[in-house]
Image: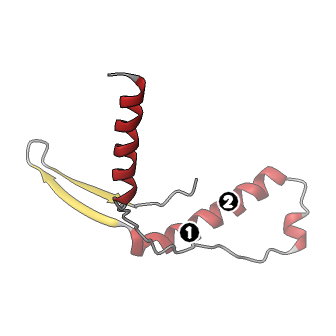
């Protein structure tokens, strides 16, 4: 097959593909935002123990957000007869923005 025949062949294939619609599937997600907001007195923040204050604030934020997550967690319970114990697990699905 010479170059002219190849060009005609690929032109014909190209024109065939132009007429085929491209099908896209779109998925839409509902995004809920979990937010923490609290007021702390100036005296508490201005203390010289900044690491201690930071730990307290981080703990407050984590507890507040964790209590808000309850409605988004899928809980599972499974009994393992070989160990005679119950296994509890939870799962959260997260949408990550790039």
Reading the image, the residue beneath label 2 is 58
Nearer to us of marks 2 and 1 is 1
Residue 34, compared with residue 83, is above or below; it is below
Residue 23 place in picture, x, y as percent = 35, 62
Q: Is 81 on the left or on the right of 52, as rendered?
A: left
> In terms of image quadrants, where is residue 10?
top left
Residue 13 place in picture, x, y as percent = 34, 44
| The disc label shown at residue 65, or none | 1
Say if mark 2 contacts mark 1, CB within 8 Å: no
Q: Is 87 on the left or on the right of 48, as rendered?
A: left
> In terms of image quadrants, where is residue 62?
bottom right
Q: Earlier in the sequence, mark 2 or mark 1?
A: 2
From this viewpoint, which residue is outermost toward the top?
A: 2
Nearer-the-camera pick, 7 or 80: 7
> Considering the numbered disc 2 on the image, is that residue within a helix, a strand or a loop?
helix
Query: In the image, what residue occupies the spot 40% across and 68% down?
Result: 27
Query: In the image, what residue occupies the spot 38% across and 37% down?
Result: 8
> Considering the numbered disc 1 on the image, is that residue within a helix, a strand or a loop?
helix
Residue 47 place in picture, x, y as percent = 89, 60
From this viewpoint, which residue is outermost toward the left?
A: 81
Residue 74, compared with residue 15, is above or below; it is below
Q: Label 2, label 1: how many angstroms apart (C-alpha)?
A: 11 Å
Q: Residues within 10 Å of mark 2 (few under 14, many from 20)?
A: few
Nearer-the-camera pick, 85 or 61: 61
Residue 41 place in picture, x, y as percent = 85, 75
Q: Is 77 on the left or on the right of 66, as rendered?
A: left
> In terms of image quadrants, where is residue 25?
bottom left
Nearer-the-camera pick, 94 or 2: 2
Query: In the image, what residue occupies the spot 72% across and 76% down?
Result: 38
Residue 78, compared with residue 68, is above or below; it is above
């Amino acid at each position: 097959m010479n170059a002219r025949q190849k060009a005609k062949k690929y032109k014909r294939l190209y024109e065939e593909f132009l007429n085929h619609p491209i099908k896209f599937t779109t998925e839409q997600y509902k995004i809920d935002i979990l937010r923490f907001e609290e007021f702390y007195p100036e005296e508490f923040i201005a203390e010289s123990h900044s690491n201690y204050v930071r730990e307290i604030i981080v703990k407050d934020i984590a507890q507040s957000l964790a209590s808000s997550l309850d409605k988004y967690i899928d809980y599972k319970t499974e009994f393992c007869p070989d160990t005679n114990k119950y296994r509890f697990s939870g799962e959260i699905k997260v949408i990550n923005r790039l």
